[in-house]
Amino acid sequence: MAKWLTGLCLVLILAAAAALRWTGLAWDDYQHFHPDERYIHWVAATIERPSSLRTAFDPRQSTLNPYYWPPEAASAGIEVLQDTPRRFAYGHLPMYLGVAATRLAEWAGSRWADALPSDWLLTRDILNASGMVEYRHLAAVTRALTGLVDLGTIVFVFLLGRRVFGTAVGLLASAFLALNVMHIQLAHFFTVDPYLTFFTVGTLYFIADCGLRIADSEAKLSFPGPIRRAHVSFLLAAVFAGLAVGTKFSAVLLFVPLGVTAVVAAGERWWRWWGTAVLVAFLAFFLTNPFAVLDWSCEVVTPAMSVGPLTIPEINWASCYLDNITAQSVMVGGGGDIPFTRQYEGTLPYLYPIEMQLKWGMGWPLGLAAFVGFGWVVWELISGLEIRKWRSWRRANLQSPISNLLLLSWAVPFFLVTGSFFVKFMRYMQPLTPFLMIFAAALLWQIGRRWLRWLVAGGVLAATAVYALAFVNIYNAPHPWITASAWIYAHVPPGALILSEQWDDALPTSLILDGEARLRAEYENAELTWLTGVGDADDTAKLAANLDLLARADYVTLVSNRVYGVVPRLPETYPNSSQYHHLLLDGSLGYELVWVNGRYPHLFSTFYRPDTFGWPGLTPPDGVSAYLAESMPGLNGGRVDESFVVYDQPLTMIFRNNGRLSAAEMGKMFERP
């Protein structure tokens, strides 16, 4: 393919990807409905340039330390703590990049915003001509930055696919990733996974470039000696690996492909190069996460233990970084019995993540091509794994054992480890999806007949494009929590008691309506605790406390399936609470559905809806069924991972207490376990 045509195709792919990622940045009116993003921005609002070098790296004085609220911390419009420890379970590098981008936007806005059209997204939100407070401006800039980073991932996928399988595969893989719905959705959030994915794909690109240059030249890495492109690529791979670990600790698995590359490229002295890679990666990590190394004020205790005649004393490692890694490791493994992870009870390792990608993350055509392609590349490696063949490899051979080995040395360990987690948030698979796109493109490009190859590849691409356009259409409608809040301000008198469910957001959210500030504080709010307290703790006292609230309340809100999608599924875990949503939805508790709203992927009048009621065995109220059938006709996609719908497309319901039943009357409806 001519270089100009390749360049034109890549530019068109990136333009389409940018449109999909930067449409709907204000998907929640910058209200921070994503809890991870909310916390990162809360911390980021206190990250400032240090006043002096003396305090810059002092964990208790620095305004750069994510593990400690700095003295005199403040930001307009939000409440921040001061001079006290804080937990920050995310990589530091994305937050620093987000703060730097916001400061740059502030600087640019003060100079150029007046010269640009006021209705542009760039002018109004990114350059902040609308005058948002820092907390909201952070959301606008960092979401745009995440989309830009994901565009960088697409470029790396093209480069990697071209380097390993040829230009056509590189372009097709980058087009698949541009239209990948999970990537489009995550590009609308300021969370760490898109940044981790960018640095991961960059690492593997430089790894592949190093390994294939060695295979082409049949020369090993050596030092001292002339510096060659293979040396540079290997060291760049190490730098990107360090940045990836500085984004999320799970990137530590990148040292597996780095080790494999060292063996391939340096032979018997592989350990020197692998050690060099570890050192370079650590330096990159330290420079972008300094307080992961400098802050030793936390408590991370390893209990004393006996190993035979040897007694190992209790050790306090004191590292705040290790404290957060330990907490996250416990969480993803299912330890700690954290309420918002109980949704994964009964889900199957490996199969559940694949199901969610097929149904929601990629869509069936692309998902099938991706996972079949993954299996195909594994098979090609196993069937061709003869060391003597490596020397005779030529770039024209699409089934090179060395290229397959280098890619799979990341993809297979990552899938085996991540797929085994108890916690299976869809975003955990994002660092694997770019490689699945490459495997899918390589598989389809192996179809022998040219017309059939173009037909199948074009069909998969077209189907994925339809799904991507349908998904982005959700952002054309206001967020259901915004419209629900507006309904409450219009129809519910101030002072009313509105119940929300613990671990979910409370309504109404504060809004500006017709130029008037309406505040959540106008209403009394209390939380129902169905998701907390399991087993013996799901007792009559917990039930009585919740029923007392229900008897006194005027309204109940169900703003997502975070609770009703879990508690009814686990009657042994929640012997009392598992009965509540059945009784609420069928009207037995005296509450009547008065408002429902949602937004889902759609093209024209055909919707692709998840079923949030079927998995927990619930029957939706007649009003919800009628709303979905009349306002959102189309396809039912079945069960969905909560993390795919809870932030930007939740089905939201409001119930009014018309029956005014007493707690005792409601209590008689619950069967005692």
Image: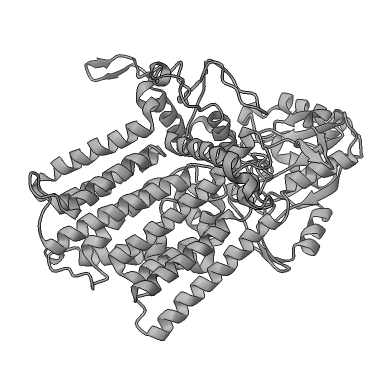
Quadrant housing residue 309: top left
- Residue 442 visible to the viewer: no
Task: Tell me if residue 370 comes above or below residue 590 in the rendering.
Answer: below
> Which scheme is used to colour this image of the protein?
one colour
Q: 482 or 579, which is in the foreground? A: 482
Task: Tell me if residue 15 comes above or below residue 130 in the rendering.
Answer: below
Q: 658 or 470, which is in the foreground? A: 470
Coordinates of residue 303 in the picture (x, y in percent): 36, 18
Image-based side of 484 in relation to 300, left or right: right
> Which image quarter is the C terminus in?
top right
Q: Residue at x 83, y 48 (%)?
A: 595
Quadrant housing residue 556: top right
Q: Residue at x 81, y 33 (%)?
A: 498
- How many numbered tags mark residues here? 0
Task: Tell me if residue 55 comes above or below residue 284 in the rendering.
Answer: above
Coordinates of residue 294 in the picture (x, y in percent): 36, 22
Coordinates of residue 340 in the picture (x, y in percent): 59, 37
Coordinates of residue 24 in the picture (x, y in percent): 64, 53
Image-based side of 82 in relation to 120, left or right: left
Image-based side of 465 in relation to 264, left or right: right
Quadrant housing residue 399: bottom left
- Residue 541 visible to the viewer: yes
Task: Tell me if residue 324 comes above or below residue 380 in the rendering.
Answer: above
Q: 672 or 331, which is in the foreground? A: 331
Image-based side of 209 in relation to 338, left or right: left
> Which image quarter is the N terminus in?
bottom left
